[in-house]
Amino acid sequence: MAPFISTTLLAIIIKIYLIFKIIDSMIHFFQSLGNITLSSFAKLGRSSVFLIQTLTGILSVIPRPALLFKQLYSIGVLSFLIITISGLFVGMVLGLQGFNILSDFGAEEALGVMVAASLVRELGPVVSALLFAGRAGSALTAEIGLMKATEQLSGMEMMAIDPIKRIIAPRFLAGVIAMPLLAALFSSIGVLGGHMVGVSMLGVDDGAYWSQMQANLDFQDDIINGIIKSIVFGFVVSWIALFEGYDAMPTSEGVSRATTRTVVNSAFAILGLDFILTALMFGDI
Amino acid sequence: MDNGVNSNTELVSIQNLSFSRGDRKIFNDISLTIQRGKITAIMGPSGTGKTTLLKLIGGQLYPDRGKIFVDGQNVHQLKRSDLYTLRKRMGMLFQSGALLTDLNIYDNIALPLREHTALSEPMIRTLVLMKLHAVGLRGARTLMPNELSGGMARRVALARAIVLDPMMIMYDEPFTGQDPISLGTLVKLIKAFNNALGLTSIIVSHDVKETASIADYIYFLSDGKIIGKGTPEQIKNLQSEWVQQFMKGDADGPVHFHYPASDYHKDLLNI
């Protein structure tokens, strides 16, 4: 009799233990879920305040264009090379792929419009924004993060110089201005790359390449919408990059994590926003 | 020199200040005053929040409780613009120097002038060169911050801190990590500036000898409390064992050599 009781007792104890274990892990799960939610909302709040301060800070950049030009150089001009080379290759690939598909239908003359439309509508803004996030965004985060870690921002505050006005706002404005220009450069070089492959190497008619493009691309629908996209991307990438740097933990590890977050979050934001913008501009969703 | 300050003798008054980071109490109800025209030192071991205290005085951090008055103004109730006006009259020397790495020495020192005054470039040049000459680095004006030694960077930061002719300067660990020559230079400069420019100086430091040699008054901070105060002479005769250990640098005393831990033998045997 005795062993029977003890085994049932043991079974009950084990069951109770397991139930507690499950409840415990569920509580843990909800705790961490709550924690993540709370901290992401807090971060969203901080980044919104940061954005508002930056936007008001822009007013004090306007009378001092020298600050802006310096940043336009390091954010914009120094991104020229990567944008040009990438644009060239993307255009060349488009020319090659487009030719293969279009020639099946005997419509090689439409290569120009195909290359240009893909570039101006999508690949120009999106790919150049992704490159911009990798090239300039990461640099901005690292720069601001290190300025924070080495007490430069704190030092400016103690000198009664607002770092948002003096450091952040010029960089933000430069990013928003540089992005559409870089995207335009990317698309233009891409069109030339497509021409190089399609016309010079694969024998599409030169006149058809340009005239089809000219006839079928709409200024409002294609060019303006592409420019709007790249302005939005420039805005978002600069915001993410500068905020991550400003919000970084002031240690080497903190800066390295912030830089990674800039690139990853920018990529998500660009691709997600691209879908939304495309749906609003071209789709009937 | 008239720095536009009120005439009472207290420049900074800290009343019942409490401040914590997370669960850790950094300051627990401390009160202290900084006299005008004097060099006041705040000493204590690393990690007692000495730098935090300077950031509280400068209005970069907010206390949990208590008030800080600088020149009669409650720092934490000022509007942002008033706080910035007050900060123009407070210089701060950061431990790292906090020079802007993308500007050369000359532009670093000219920065507060260019931001806050409408002075002409020739005037700014004269002022910058005067301050640079005072710290002995007039010849180094074209160097970038990364080309400077630690001691030189701190002297440049000192020149920048006094370029707006402030009423007070806060020094954050000015002597840490300096070779004997730069140490001597800094001690001499801090003393000379305090007297020649009519400044009030606050030094937070754990370098006993150098600080005691120039301070008019010393406060000791430990575990969020003030545990000793007085002129350097009074400090030498203070009965506090803790202060004596700190001043003499003994390895063991009221502050133990070992971080609190379980019994050594049991720990080794893992029981």
Image (cartoon, coloured by chain):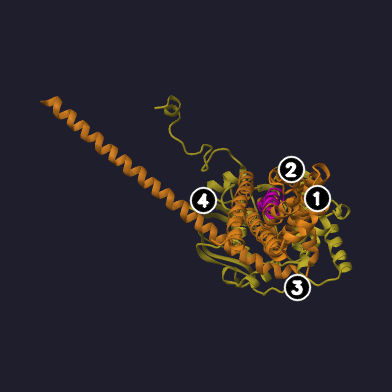
Q: Main secondary structure of the magenta part?
A: helix
Q: Callout 4: helix, strand or loop?
A: loop
Q: Please report the residue visible at 86 percent of the width from the left and 53 percent of the height from the top.
A: B142
Pick the quarter of the image with the C terminus of chain A: bottom right
Mark 3 and mark 2: Cα distance apart in space: 77 Å
Tell me if mark 2 has few (under 14), some (14-19) or many (20+) residues whose alpha carbon lies within 10 angstroms of its own. Answer: many
Q: Which residue is mark 4?
A: B223
Q: Nearer the viewer, mark 4 or mark 1?
A: 1
Tell me if mark 4 has few (under 14), some (14-19) or many (20+) residues whose alpha carbon lies within 10 angstroms of its own. Answer: some
Rendered image: mark on residue B2 = 3
Residue A10 higher or lower than B189, as above or below: above
Mark 4 and mark 3: Cα distance apart in space: 38 Å
Query: Is circle 1 on the same chain as circle 2?
Result: yes
- Identified by mark 2, the residue type is Leu
Tell me if mark 3 has few (under 14), some (14-19) or many (20+) residues whose alpha carbon lies within 10 angstroms of its own. Answer: few
- Spot the yellow chain and give its letter: B
